[in-house]
Image (tube, grey):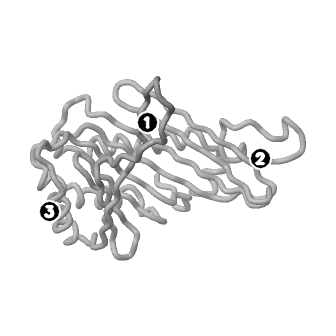
Amino acid sequence: MEFKNHKISEAVCAMRFSLIPDWDITYFAKFYDLINLIGYSVKQEIKPIQLSFDLNLNQSIEAPKLVEKDIQMVFKTADGKYAIIYSNGYVSIHTLGFYPGWDFFLKETANVLEKYLSIHHNSFIISTQMIYINTFTLSNDENLSDYFNFMPKTENFGQGSEISQQYHTTYSIIPNKKLQIRTFLTSQDNLTRNIFLECSCLTENVEKIESSEWSKLANEAHDGARNLFVKIVTEKFKEKIK
């Protein structure tokens, strides 16, 4: 059963494939020509960076240098509802500000993967990850324990409410899954309290299935992420979004 009134602000289906040795930036144009046919007409280049430190015990520490990592491209639909991030060995499909349900999202992912695999013939699928991001606001008389069954009850400590919170945990599940939960709460003047919840499941291709069978891993990742959400939220939360 899909939750009809969910709080999902972004859903992501991310896939990693084996790298193409002779891959170059011309693949961006090849991929764009294909996905433009299915509505992804807006493009943007991004250059992820990382800090690099040069350490010499005989000298003072210099300021870190910015080092460019692999270039990625973002492609969006004109209405801004869907986006793709693409680079060598990686492609992810995002819903932005809405979620159409798994069946529709899987079909959209299939449309994108058909284009991806048409120019990455020999790529081997390594893993698939489903990420669901939920955002919502707590009312003045609510606490985190009203929504998450692993949170302590505020009333156990006295009269009051949470004003900040962070939680992050990862589980390795036999034979091929990694589950992750992230939550944090922010407040403005202790009045408006905004909640961020991320549930994700990564499935590794331990059975060495063909890339054309990617949907098997995607369905496993979806089921794992959904089951994770169902297990950690309260009945009150489920009633609100059913």
Q: Residue 97 placed where, x, y %?
A: 48, 65
Are circles 1 and 2 on residues that touch, CB within 8 Å? no
Q: Hey, which residue is sitting farthest right in the picture? A: 159
Mark identifier at residue 22 = none
- Front position in the image: 223 or 193: 193
Disc number lying in front (3 or 2):
3
Which residue is painted at 19% across and 72% down in the image? 37
- Front position in the image: 128 or 84: 84
Q: Residue 196 placed where, x, y %?
A: 59, 52
Mark identifier at residue 53 = 1
SS assignment at label 3: helix
Q: Amino acid at mark 1?
A: Phe
The quarter of the picture where the C terminus appears is: bottom right
35 sits left or right of 169 in the view: left
Disc number lying in front (1 or 2):
1
Q: CA distance from mark 3 to mark 2?
A: 50 Å
Q: Residue 5 placed where, x, y %?
A: 55, 62
Mark identifier at residue 30 = 3
Looking at marks 3 and 2 on the same chain, the residue that comes earlier in the sequence is marked by 3
SS assignment at label 1: loop
Looking at marks 1 and 2 on the same chain, the residue that comes earlier in the sequence is marked by 1
Disc number lying in front (3 or 1):
1
Which residue is painted at 41% across and 39% down in the image? 52
Looking at marks 3 and 1 on the same chain, the residue that comes earlier in the sequence is marked by 3
Q: CA distance from mark 1 to mark 2?
A: 38 Å
Compared with residue 28, is residue 169 higher up or lower down, i.e. above or below? above
Q: Which residue is mark 2?
A: 162
Q: Amino acid at mark 2?
A: Glu
Which residue is painted at 61% across and 43% down in the image? 233
